[in-house]
């Protein structure tokens, strides 16, 4: 029997091709889907022949093929790709955010192959199984919960006697209507499961890391979370021996030695964590890994052990900074302890994510102020990425059961349910018609502030973190808190752009316009804040914008020269490298903000260059006046000869030695990748004066950059000025 397993899409949230192609979207969307690959591996051991269709990868192919109608046409396109597998059974994984699209794709698959069997699984289908079968006649079965043991049983019955009532966890159509068997037993021995079929996940060789399942089940019972129902609240973990064997197998097969260990609550059992870390340390392997944890299930000694064993990142689901709300949502964390654990991971150099939520029905202004305060505490830790999401009511949770009769549908609701600017019309039609199947797209009733304010706060903090991290930290410190800053900013934004809302508002915050407008807003209110840190960082952002605008006009046509030809070329600064002069020591300002202290008001002239250290942001690197002058001279107008003539005046001694020093300086900044050298004929519209002499930059014994008097060895990287490119 041929079985096609179809992943749940996430990239399709982004109907705009530009949004979908953002690096962070692609990274997240192309990660292998462990649940589907685990099932495929189990089927490979039996009589079925599995294929896997990754709908995220399919969506990127669709966009590359010229698909411009978003998921409306993508449903048809994807259905054809799925049907081309020639399968007898199509098994669709599901998550809440893309369940409407999964439904629409499955309908088209059934239409094109009427004799096939459509099987749903995964968290969302498991939570709304009977409702799904009642509403959609083309869905034949739902296999709930963990399915590595039950899927082979189901396929045996499907191809044999069809005694579906004997398959645990199966919801199916009986003569009397949709029928639901009892839950399947959980899989106690996770070591007995085969390694997921990563070879079916597409091209993963060379990936920076891979997800690897560490365990299942969470023993806690937060009111808003559906995970504990899916895994029946039974905590289990693979043995250290099995985890090490899996890591070694992946390293041997794919050359990958970094892993995201998947388990909602790995640290709930301290003994298991210690045993796992000890086993990795004893093995001598240098694997790196990340995991999820509660802040009350770790302490500094345990975190130190984890770091020694290769833990490079940790995800803390803290949810709220309010003690009152912690009790109401049954999370029961201590916000002060959470802050201490975040600080501990920072000291250990771990890349930490802190997840927070707003939009609980009982949440008030004071609760929100405490949550944003925890967000800003996390923001001051350079290795930490705080998140703020707007709550979604998930099917099957206590929160949904309590408020299901009071839900409201608006343009854009929860960021946990949809990340894009707009939502597909066909999806919206399904959501309106079947609110009990798609409750996560609806709003919960809340106290003030209203939903529009919460949604904008989320966008403000998300994009502010990406573009204006330290400016936000300075504003938070010099005011009543970031929530007050946001409310003042929102009043300003509404006056200037009153029509923005929903998707258009999200789009605004994604654009560079938001960063420019907010810096202007802060500049107008410098006297109100009275903070040297705010003034210094506003000055930085303004100087960066000015340098970026100026450098955008630099000619960079054609292909840079290489080899001996560069001696006749025209040096130009590389894209995103700007020279900035400030009257502030930005590093000392940021150091004070990290410590939660107020920076001194002392001014100090500094020169910096920008350094694109990620695909989305830049940092400052302090440079000497000589390097600044050299980089400024590479303006697309000076030839190599002009550069040498101008910079030789910065050195003392005989003419030949000064010329030699200038040549070495140019060779050094070129070798460091700070500049590119173009042929005069390729720079249309520029006015190079003449070409430099042959022999410049060709000396085999030219001094390296750090010995040429450029002070490059003293460059200081300024942490995360976070200017968006």
Image: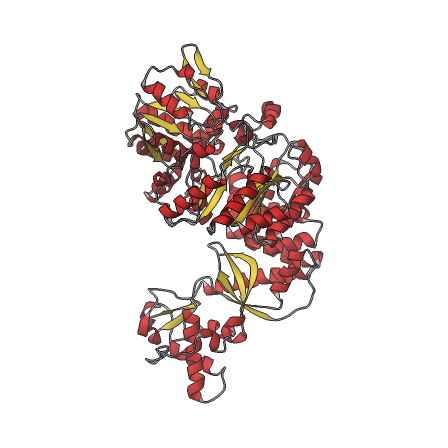
Q: Residue at x 56, y 33 (%)?
A: 218
Residue at (34% x, 81% y) in the render: 693
Residue, far bottom: 654
State the image coordinates of residue 24 (x, y, percent, origin top left): 46, 47
- Front residue of this view, candidates 537 and 562: 562
In front of the other: 645 or 236: 236
The N terminus is located in which quarter?
top left
Q: Is residue 420 above or below residue 492?
A: above
Measured as percent of width and height from the top left, residue 662 is found at 44, 80
174 to the left or right of 80:
right
Looking at this rendering, what residue extends furthest in the top direction?
A: 176
Instruction: Report x, y in % for residue 409.
Output: 55, 29
- Looking at the rendering, which quadrant does residue 56 occupy? top left
Residue drawn at 67 percent across, 58 percent down: 526
Residue 492 can be seen, yes or no: no
Would you say residue 179 is visible in this rendering? yes
Determine whether 33 is above or below 694 in the image.
Answer: above
Judge by depth and name the residue closer to the eye, 7 or 610.
7
Percent from the top left, x then y, of residue 235? 55, 32
């Amino acid at each position: 029997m041929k079985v096609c397993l179809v992943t749940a899409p996430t990239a399709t949230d982004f109907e705009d091709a530009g949004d979908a192609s953002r690096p962070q979207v692609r990274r997240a969307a192309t990660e292998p889907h462990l649940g589907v690959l685990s099932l495929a591996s189990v089927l490979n051991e039996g009589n079925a022949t599995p294929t896997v269709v990754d709908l995220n990868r399919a969506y990127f192919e669709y966009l590359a093929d010229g698909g411009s109608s978003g998921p409306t046409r993508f449903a048809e396109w994807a259905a054809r790709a799925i049907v081309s597998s020639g399968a007898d059974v199509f098994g669709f994984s599901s998550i809440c955010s893309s369940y409407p699209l999964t439904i629409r794709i499955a309908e088209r698959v059934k239409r094109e192959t009427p004799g096939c069997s459509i099987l749903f699984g995964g968290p969302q289908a498991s939570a709304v199984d009977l409702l799904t079968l009642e509403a959609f006649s083309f869905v034949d079965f739902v296999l709930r919960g963990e399915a590595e043991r039950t899927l082979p049983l189901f396929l045996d019955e499907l191809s044999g006697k069809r005694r579906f009532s004997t398959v645990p966890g199966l919801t199916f159509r009986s003569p009397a209507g949709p029928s639901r068997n009892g839950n399947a037993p959980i899989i106690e021995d996770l070591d007995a499961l085969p390694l997921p079929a990563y070879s079916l996940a597409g091209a993963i060789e060379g990936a920076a890391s891979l997800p690897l399942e560490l365990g299942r089940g969470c023993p806690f019972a937060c009111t808003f979370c559906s995970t504990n129902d899916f895994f029946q609240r039974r905590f289990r973990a693979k043995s250290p021996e099995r985890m090490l064997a899996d890591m070694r197998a992946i390293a041997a097969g794919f050359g990958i030695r970094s892993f995201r260990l998947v388990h909602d609550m790995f640290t709930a059992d301290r003994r298991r964590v210690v045993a796992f870390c000890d086993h990795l340390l004893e093995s001598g392997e240098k694997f790196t890994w990340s995991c999820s944890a509660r802040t009350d299930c770790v302490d500094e000694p345990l975190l130190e052990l984890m770091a020694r064993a290769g833990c490079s990142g940790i995800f803390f689901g803290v949810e709220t900074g309010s003690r009152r709300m912690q009790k109401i949502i049954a999370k029961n964390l201590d916000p002060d302890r959470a802050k201490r654990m975040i600080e501990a991971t920072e000291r250990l150099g771990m890349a930490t994510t802190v997840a927070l939520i707003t939009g609980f029905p009982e949440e008030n202004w004071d609760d929100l102020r405490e949550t944003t305060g925890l967000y800003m505490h996390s923001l001051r830790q350079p290795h930490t990425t705080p998140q703020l999401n707007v709550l979604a009511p998930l099917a099957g949770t206590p929160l949904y059961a309590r408020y299901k009769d009071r839900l409201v549908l608006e343009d854009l609701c929860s960021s946990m349910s949809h990340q894009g600017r707009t939502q597909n019309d066909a999806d919206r039609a399904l959501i309106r018609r079947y609110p009990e199947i798609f409750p996560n797209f609806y709003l919960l009733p809340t106290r003030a502030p209203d939903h529009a304010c919460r949604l904008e706060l989320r966008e403000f903090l998300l994009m502010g973190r990406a573009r204006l991290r330290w400016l936000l930290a300075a504003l938070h410190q010099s005011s009543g808190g970031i929530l007050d800053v946001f409310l003042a900013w929102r009043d300003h934004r509404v006056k200037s752009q009153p029509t923005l809302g929903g998707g258009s508002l999200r789009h605004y915050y994604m654009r560079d316009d938001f960063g420019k407008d907010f810096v202007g807003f802060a500049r107008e209110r410098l006297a109100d804040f009275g903070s040297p840190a705010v003034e210094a960082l506003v000055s930085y952002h303004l100087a960066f914008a000015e340098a970026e605008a100026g450098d955008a006009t630099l000619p960079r046509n054609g292909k840079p020269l290489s080899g001996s030809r560069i001696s006749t070329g025209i040096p130009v600064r590389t894209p995103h490298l700007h020279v900035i002069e400030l009257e502030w020591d930005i590093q000392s300002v940021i150091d004070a903000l990290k410590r939660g202290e107020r920076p001194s008001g002392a001014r100090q002239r500094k020169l910096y260059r920008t350094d694109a250290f990620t695909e989305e942001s830049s940092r400052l690197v302090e440079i000497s006046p000589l390097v600044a002058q050299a980089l400024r001279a590479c303006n697309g107008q000076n030839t190599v000869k002009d550069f040498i003539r101008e910079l030789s005046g910065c050195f003392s001694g005989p003419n030949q030695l000064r010329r030699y020093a200038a040549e070495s300086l140019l060779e050094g900044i070129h070798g460091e990748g700070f500049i590119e050298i173009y042929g005069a004929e390729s720079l249309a519209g520029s006015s190079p004066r003449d070409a430099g002499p042959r022999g410049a930059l060709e000396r085999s014994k030219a001094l390296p950059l750090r010995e040429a008097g450029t002070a490059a060895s003293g460059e200081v990287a300024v942490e995360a000025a976070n200017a968006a490119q």
